[in-house]
Image: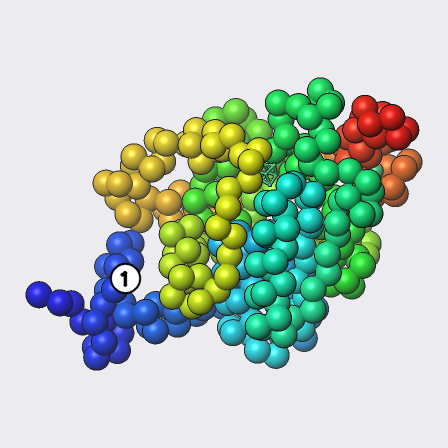
Amino acid sequence: MPIRCKRCRAALSEIYIPYARLNLCPDCFLKFYTSKVKRTVEEFKMFRDDDVVGVAVSGGKDSMALLHALKYGFPKLSLKALHVNLGIANYSAHCQAKVEKLVESLDVELHIFDLQKEIGITIGDFKRTPFKDKLCSVCGTIKRHVFEELAIRAKVKVLATGHNLDDIVAIMFNNFLYGQWEQLVRLKPVLPPLAEGMAYKVKPLIKCPENENLLYCLYGNVPFREMECPFSSGTGVKKKARIIETAAGDNPYFKHQLLNRFLELIPLLERNKPQKSFKTCQICGFPSLDQICAYCKRLSLVWRAMGKA
Ligand code: SF4
Ligand code: ZN
């Protein structure tokens, strides 16, 4: 027998939210999702209505859903989309085209950093370096730095990223297993700027499971990439945390419980965190634990390998 939506009680339900035992129709699901994102932003005081907020958009379902939901959830907010073109054949052009389509439909300003045009490299060029088997790791370092740079260029006070609930609990679990306490603290919902002039980092999708981000894109007509990165190894941190998926199969609230316990632990972890003093990278001027930051070290490696250094 068809089930009616539990919110409007008029339309037929198409979506079941297991941890909330909610049957929803598409319209009520879209409202459910945007109000969850809104409540998360408010709960952790991620930004105010008069802030300039940048959204790091890769073209994937999470960041595209985030940009769209923020635009509808906070209509007065000044939003800017930030995108890094990684120069990966076909894939990067495809991602950028999806981002351009979304920002045009939302009327949001877009700032792009094209690795090839701006610094003369692509992620594939790292195949010529000792990072050849760790392209995702080097890609992460490059993106983190470039998004900081884009945030400064776009003059945004807050940088929102599309980390979802599944990402957070999987990374948290791995950091916990390997005792990486400092990285664990970096998963908190709001990170203050590393230096003056840099942006706060916020994670408004911290309570959104990745399948809800996908459903939001599908039911909300939000464009997102339909290609896999050719360098994706499929052995991401989520695959390693299969034990979480197994437990979540028996208890749909399991990931939320993990997240909630982690949020309670943060103040304790922060109090016991060793104080590290940041220097200034001698090349780019960004905060760094060494004389030369990880980004500049990797750039000089790839330039050298390409005969450009
Ligand atoms: Fe970068 Fe790896 Fe993602 Fe490709 S799969 S975009 S190389 S992090
Ligand atoms: Zn540097």
Residue of label 1: 15
Work out which residue is located at the far front of the displayed protein and give it: 90
Q: Position of residue 21 (x, y in %)?
A: 24, 59
**160 versus 34 height, above or below:** above
Residue depicted at x 61% and y 67%: 103
Write the residue at 43% across / 29% down: 240
> Whole-percent x and y of residue 138?
68, 32
Residue 181 visible in rendering:
no
221 over 146 or under it: above or below: below
Image-quarter location of ligand 2: top right
253 vs 217: above or below: above
Residue 3 in which image quadrant: bottom left
Quarter of the C terminus within the rendering: top right
Q: Point out residue 142 in the picture as x, y percentages from the top left corner.
A: 72, 39
Q: Quadrant of the N terminus?
A: bottom left
Residue type marked 1 = Ile
Asked if ligand 1 lies within 8 A of label 1, the reply is no
Q: Please say if 192 is above or below 36.
A: above
Give how far across and how far down residue 246 sits, in percent. 29, 35
**Horizontal relation, residue 48 to residue 122: left or right:** left
**x 53%, y 59%: residue:** 64
Q: How many residues crowd around disc 1 within 10 Å: few (fewer than 14), some, or many (20 or more)?
A: some
Residue 259 vs residue 58, the one in the foreground: 58
Q: Which residue sits furthest left?
A: 1
Q: How is the image coloured?
A: rainbow
Compare residues 3 and 184 and report the one nearer the observer.
3
Task: Determine whether, in the image, residue 103 is placed left or right of residue 206.
Answer: right
